[in-house]
Image: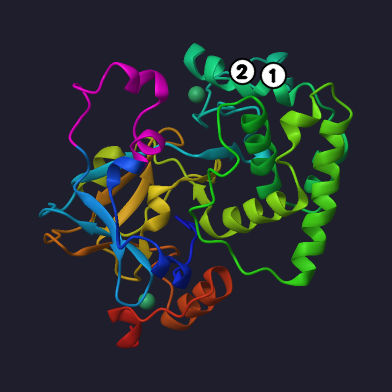
Amino acid sequence: MRVSLSRSLRLASLLTKPKSFQFHHFTTTTTATPEQSSDSTRDRPDPPPIRVGLTDSAGRGVFATRPIGAGELIHTAKPAVCYPSLNVLHTVCYYCLRRISNPNGAEAQRVSFCSEDCKRRCMEFYDVETKADWAAFDDYCRTHDLKYPFMVKRLACMIISGVASSDILDILQPANLTSQMISRMEEEYGLLRNAFRKTLISDEHVAFLTKQWYIGVLARIRINAFRIELAAGLYEDLLSSAAASVEAEAAVGHAVYILPSFYNHDCDPNAHIIWIDNADAKLKALRDVDEGEELRICYIDASLDRDARQELLSRGFGFQCNCNRCLHGD
Ligand SMILES: [Zn+2]
Ligand SMILES: [Zn+2]
């Protein structure tokens, strides 16, 4: 599989929101940590050459505010929340998903970090995670082959520890859920809630953790999560590559971002999202883009034929693609 990300376009509710979003609303979640931003206002790089605005047909979209050259790095984005794939849990950094070359045998039973910095940042909420017994929740998710609930678990721990706010994903489009999906989520929710109930964490700190919150968050993760495939070692190739998607190793995990979720889809995109060595996303132009032009990425494998793409986009993202390629039957 390749870059197979997620998100959808029907954003009718946004029509009630301001027509244009200023990028600086997102800077703290996309480019800088609170620690970094406190004293670096002057040193901060120029804001990315983009704005988020409304498109004619697809709700929100991201537009170039100046000409952008092919291959240019448009901006980077840190995850709002991420989580490693279970099969690499002990061989990637539990915080940033960077591969760890030599996880030592004894340590590999526990989570590992690539650096003291990641360890320190993760400990802020990992301390909360270790207070609860996750056996029932984890078993349920493993048995049912669920990956997204682990992201909700991490987000819940981040909120309890005060490093994230409970409405952090509210700005993203939620997936439409069937009643079957909702019953499954209610079951997961019960297990998650129970894990915290048996700890000494006060009710006040878990007051946000309602069934409605859980379902709302998961509905957003479902449609906005990016599958992270590291392209380590291929960076030079990527710089010169015009391909919309790149061959890469298996996924090291999944992550949800704010700004990258506003990019609409195109089967012949002018931008793409890549990961070099950890979960920090890089948005790059694939060809020259004019000022004012909408920047779009491909949510799926662009090499699929039209019918396969339409099927995937409709099933996974809930929309029909009307890009030039699709309109011309390519
Ligand atoms: Zn790390
Ligand atoms: Zn298309």
Vertical relation: 315 (above or below) 301? below
Position of 209 with respect to 82 (left or right) is right
Magenta residues, start to end = 26-46
Q: Residue 272 in magenta?
A: no
Report whether the residue tagged 2 is closer than 8 Å to ligand 1.
no
15 horizontally vs 161: left or right = left
Amino acid type of the residue that numbered disc 2 sits on in the rendered structure:
Met
Residue 295 in sight here: yes
Q: x, y percentage for residue 267?
A: 35, 71
Q: Which mark is residue 287?
A: none
- Report crowding for label 2: few under 14, some 14 to 19, many 20 or more residues within 10 A (C-alpha): some
Cβ of mark 1 under 8 Å from ligand 1: the answer is: no
* Viewer-closest of 48 and 150: 48
The residue that mark 2 highlights is 123
Quadrant location of ligand 2? bottom left
Q: Which mark is residue 127?
A: 1
Asked whether the residues under the numbered discs 2 and 1 touch, taking CB atoms below 8 Å apart as contact, a structural biologist would say yes
Characterize the local packing of mark 1: few (<14), some (14-19) or many (20 or more) Cα atoms within 10 angstroms: few
Between 207 and 8, the one nearer to me in the picture: 207
| Depicted 319 relative to depicted 136: above or below | below
Question: From the viewer's perspective, is 286 left or right of 121?
Answer: left
SS label for mark 1: helix
